[in-house]
Each structure stands twice: as C-alpha cells, then as structure tokens.
Image (tube, rainbow, N blue to C red):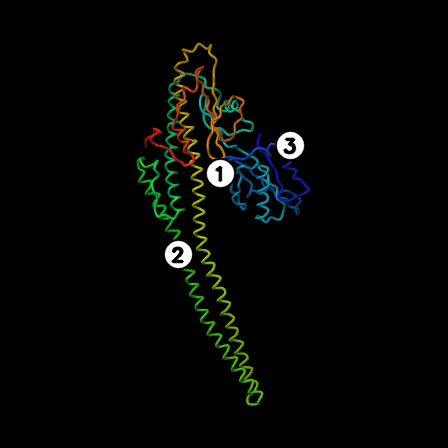
Amino acid sequence: MKINALRLAIPTLRMLPILLLSMSAAGYCHAAEEMLVPDDKLAVRVVEWRAADGQYAPSDALSGDYLIDANGSISMPIAGRISAAGQTADSLSDMIAKKLTATANLPGRLFVAVEVAVHAPVFVTGMVETPGQFPYQTNLTVMKAVSLAGGYLRLRGNDASFQRNSIEAAGAFRTAVVSKRDLLMQRARLLAEIAGNDDFQIPDELRDSPDIEQLKDDETNLMHLRRVQLQSRVDAAGAAARLYGQEIANLEAKIVSQKKQVDLAREELDTVQALIKKGLTNNSRQFSLNRGLAEESSSLLDLEIALTKAKQNLAESQREQTDIVNKSNAENQEALNTVNMALRKTAIDMQVAHLLGEEADLSQQVAGDQDDWDGSKAVQRQFLITRRQPDGSDVVIEADETTPLLPHDLLQIAHPLGADTTALLPSKSPSQTALAGIGSGAIDLKESGIKR
C-alpha cells in the first residue's frame, strides 16, 4: 500500500473532488503512521483552485517526483529545501503547502498531495535466489522479502553461477572501498577548511593505501583553489569598502566647505537687509542674495544625501565581506554532512557486498554436499536483521519469517541444511569492521583483503 496524504494550503470548506477520489480511508489512516526515510522517492502533486475560472489547474512546475536525500530533505522549486525524513506524508504535504503559500504568491488556493512512489530499499543476502536490494513495501515481513528475492536458494551445483556471484560481490566490495577512501580524504580536507588550516593530514587508516599521496595532492590543490576564490571575493568586497570610505571622507570635507559658503551667503544677506532698512540699497540686491543662499543650501543638502548613501554602501560592503565567509563555512559544513552520510551508506554497501561474496562461497560448498543429504533432515534457517539506530549505531536482531522489516534493513538468511548456522559465519568479517567504523568513516583497507 502506498502512502497517500492531502493537505490544504489554507483553510477551506470545499474539498478537492479529483484528489479526494484517489485517496482511500485506509490509505489516509496509514499515512498518518508511517514515517518517511532517506531514499524514499515521493510523487508530489500541486493543484491550484482558480476562482475566476471555477476550476482546478495542476501546477506542472511544482509537481513531480522528489527523492529524499541522505540528509533527509527534498528540494522543491520556490519552496526550497524541506526536511522530509521523520515526517509522515500527511505532515509533509501540510508543510509544502504552507511554504508554497508563503512564497509562491499565487492568486488561488493550493492543494498538495504527497505519495511515496518508490520506497527506500531493504537488502536481502544469503541463501536466496537473487540477493540484492529491493524497494520497501508497506507491512513487509521477512517472508515477503524472501519472496522478493526469488525465494529460498534452490541448490543446483552450478559452479559457474557461484563463481560469477562471487566475482560480482568482490567487484562491488572493491568499488565501495575505493569510494570510502575518496570520501575519507574529502572529509579530511573539509575539516581543515572549516578550521581555517592551510593543509591537512592523510587519515591514519589511509596512510598505507597505494597512490594516496596523489589523491592527497588533488584534494590539496582543490583546497587551495577554493581558498583563492574565497579570498578574491573577500578582497573585492574589501576594495569596494575602501572606495566608499574614501568617498565618505571627500564628501565630509566638501560638506564642511559648503557649510562655510552657506554661512557667508547668509551673512551677506543680513548685511544687505540692514542697508535696505537704512535706504542705502535696493531690493534687487536682496533678491539676488536670497537666490544665491538657496542654491548654496541646496548644494549642501545634495552633499549630505550623497554622504548618507555612501555610508549605506560602506555598511553593505562590510556586511558582504562577513556574509561571504559565513556562506563559505555553511557550504563546507553542509558538504561535510553529506560526506558523512555517504560514508555510512558506503559502509552498508561494503557489508552487503562482503556478505554476498561469503554466501556465494557458502552456497557452492552446500551445493557440493547436496548428494550426501538424504532429505530426512529438517531444513533450518536463521534470519538476522541488521538495523540502523537513530544514533548511527547498528543492532543485529534474530528474526523469523513473520518479523516485520523497516526501510534500510539488511536481512541475512543462513541455510546450512540442518547444521548450526553460526558455525558457517566468520566471527568478524571486514564488513563488520566497516560497520564498527561507520561513525568515524574508518575502515582498515588491509583487513578488507582488497588491493588496489
């Protein structure tokens, strides 16, 4: 069942008939309970009620499919970035409607519908026909996940198939290791930029990696280029501020001189007015002086207005210098958050690839022993769910076929034909080591057994 929800942008007594027909009562109730998670693909539909036309008009510019990114957000035109993870489709539609109403400035009322088009994946590995990742489904259980993966493994003894699966898993694991190496170096560079350092050290877990110095040089060059660009923008704003400062000084000097001119004109006018009272001069002389005083006063006013504008421009230039640095720091922090999320995802990818390789080898061994199995032994299976916790740690849960799954769960299925399943699994695999280092993004490349 897909999540479906509807929210009105502003209160209204009229419901939207077209959208209302597409939403069942059961779907609406479920939407209020199920939380959205990263990697959910959302179908967002925005409709505007146009009272002048008496009809509903869909907004093609705003409607569309949106993927919740690793930071738990979606990015919509006009509304900008919106936090989606942890919300229901119901509450998210309400938030989108409010943001669009506040920013879009549309004449009509907005109606927003949010539906999960494709759920975030779950991962199935072990003794199934087609291990891998599959879109989550509402009310997904272990048994349903096994069905999505093609059912339990039917042993065929096909060495070529097992070898191919092992090679594919090894390639996926190696790709994840390389990706993790690059992400760790990017994180080291971003941390140095945020701290204001001119250089950064190679992370300890990467020191013995081949070609690591070249990768470090590439990140260092990028770091220096970004710093030059930032400094250039700051210097440009500083140069503008200095020019405005010089303009202010010149205007203040002109204002002092102009005030003297106004004072002289006023004194001369007072003298002429005294002479007129005594009959020693005519009114035309007073008229000429009045006009001159008005012109001098107007010039003084123009200079004072120009001085005010120059001071405003100076304040804007100084504020721009601060904003440039603050924006750069914010962008670096956002990039660091994205890298950390990618490191966590890469660790999961490594675990999946490693377990797929282990199970391919295990399947080959079991297939080779099937002739020795008389069919009288009860088939025992062990179900283990690796689940991410809100604090970033992982827990392993023993499950059965009816246990419900959550998005991003890793389901491992062991099928040892009546043997103790724990004896067939390594005590500590490279994938487990990767999970242990998720928080810091660490991984021991030597322990992984992969050489570049």
Give neighbour class at mark 3: few <14, some 14-19, many 20+ (Cα, 10 Å). Answer: few
Up-down relation of residue 304 to residue 285 (above or below): above
Q: Which residue is mark 1?
A: 69
Judge depth for marks 3 and 2 and give the one in front: 2
Q: Is residue 123 left or right of residue 222?
A: right
Indicate the quadrant containing the N terminus: top left, top right, bottom left or bottom right.
Answer: top right
- Where does residue 74 sit, x and y in percent of width and height? 51, 40
- Where does residue 147 sit, x and y in percent of width and height? 51, 22
- The disc, 3 or 2, on the residue closer to the chain's N-terminal end is 3
Up-down relation of residue 442 to residue 297 (above or below): above
Q: Is residue 190 left or right of residue 56?
A: left
Give neighbour class at mark 1: few <14, some 14-19, many 20+ (Cα, 10 Å). Answer: some
Query: Measuring 53% from the left and 78% from the top, which residue is drawn there?
Result: 293
Give neighbour class at mark 2: few <14, some 14-19, many 20+ (Cα, 10 Å). Answer: few
Query: Measuring 55% from the left and 80% from the top, which residue is drawn there?
Result: 290
Is mark 3 in CB contact (under 8 Å) with mark 2? no
Label 3 to label 1, Cα distance in Å? Answer: 29 Å
Q: Amino acid at mark 1?
A: Asp
- Where does residue 360 sit, x and y in percent of width and height? 40, 22
- The disc, 3 or 1, on the residue closer to the chain's N-terminal end is 3
Q: Secondary structure at mark 3?
A: helix
Q: Amino acid at mark 3?
A: Ala
Q: Which residue is mark 3?
A: 25
Q: Which residue is mark 2?
A: 235
Up-down relation of residue 346 to residue 48 (above or below): above
Up-down relation of residue 255 to residue 33 (above or below): below
